[in-house]
Image (cartoon, rainbow, N blue to C red):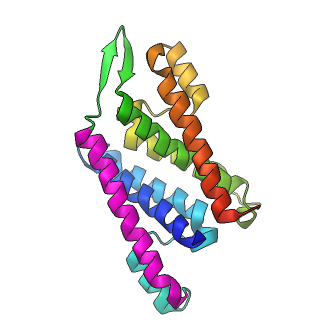
Amino acid sequence: MKKYLVEFIGTFFLVFTIGMTVLAPGAGAMAPLAIGSVLAVMIFAGGHVSGGHFNPAVTLGVWMRGRCETGDVVPYMVAQSAAAIVASFAVKALKTGLVAKTAALGGAMTPEILPALLAEFLFTFALVWVVLNVATAKGTANNSFYGLAIGFTVLAGAYAVGGVSGGAFNPAVALGICTMGIVAWSSIWIYLVANLAGGAVAAIAYKAVNGTD
């Protein structure tokens, strides 16, 4: 089950980033950079647990190579497919149903509440998930890529949802952008709630996968 959760999380963020950066308004020519970055960081984060497939075709190939147990093939593919569907609904919610926009108010942005909450929660979760897996897990101990993985998670998030929430993913950053007048103070609670919730849920997911590691 731990491996399947990792495959679900990695595939979710891959498909979510694709949808958010490719569908208008997206990241334009920078979409491939964001997509490649999120795939890389999810592999850094989950590769030591599941192998970091995030793709049924990869799972098939790895199985035929003899490096994936037969009993894992279908569960991997189910987890990957389910993640793609859930990610697609999240993208549609932000791109259409929730109308992701920001409005100017006295020179500062006021993000729409539901889109900003969802965007900040998801990529704060991704950021903390990557940090915990590349910087604290035994399976990735003494690696030389943790800084790159963490930084590129923020890059992918900024391209994917920066236009929705401002892309803080960090209560301290939220405090800073409010102080600088980039975001209205009336919206700071969105970041505090979403960022802290995202970090807490990421920690729970990490413990579910890595136990007492």
- Residue under the image location 68 percent in, 58 percent down: 207
Main SS type for the magenta part? helix
Left or right for 138, reference 202: right
- Residue under the image location 61 percent in, 26 percent down: 172
The residue lying toward the viewer, choosing from 28 and 122, is 122
Marker count (numbered): 0
**What is the quadrant of residue 74 in the picture?**
bottom left
Magenta highlight on residue 87: yes
| The C terminus sits in image quarter | bottom right
* Residue 68: x %, y % from top left: 54, 85
Asked if one can make out residue 28 in the rendered structure from this viewpoint, the answer is no
- Residue under the image location 22 percent in, 41 percent down: 96
* Residue 131: x %, y % from top left: 64, 50
Q: Is residue 180 above or below residue 86?
A: above
* Residue 47: x %, y % from top left: 59, 68
The region drawn magenta spans: 69-97
| The N terminus sits in image quarter | bottom right
The residue lying toward the viewer, choosing from 53 and 87, is 87
Left or right for 178, reference 130: left
- Residue under the image location 59 percent in, 50 percent down: 202
**What is the quadrant of residue 88 in the picture?**
bottom left
Asked if one can make out residue 142 in the rendered structure from this viewpoint, the answer is yes
* Residue 56: x %, y % from top left: 39, 76
Q: Residue furthest top?
A: 106
The residue lying toward the viewer, choosing from 140 and 101, is 101
Magenta highlight on residue 86: yes
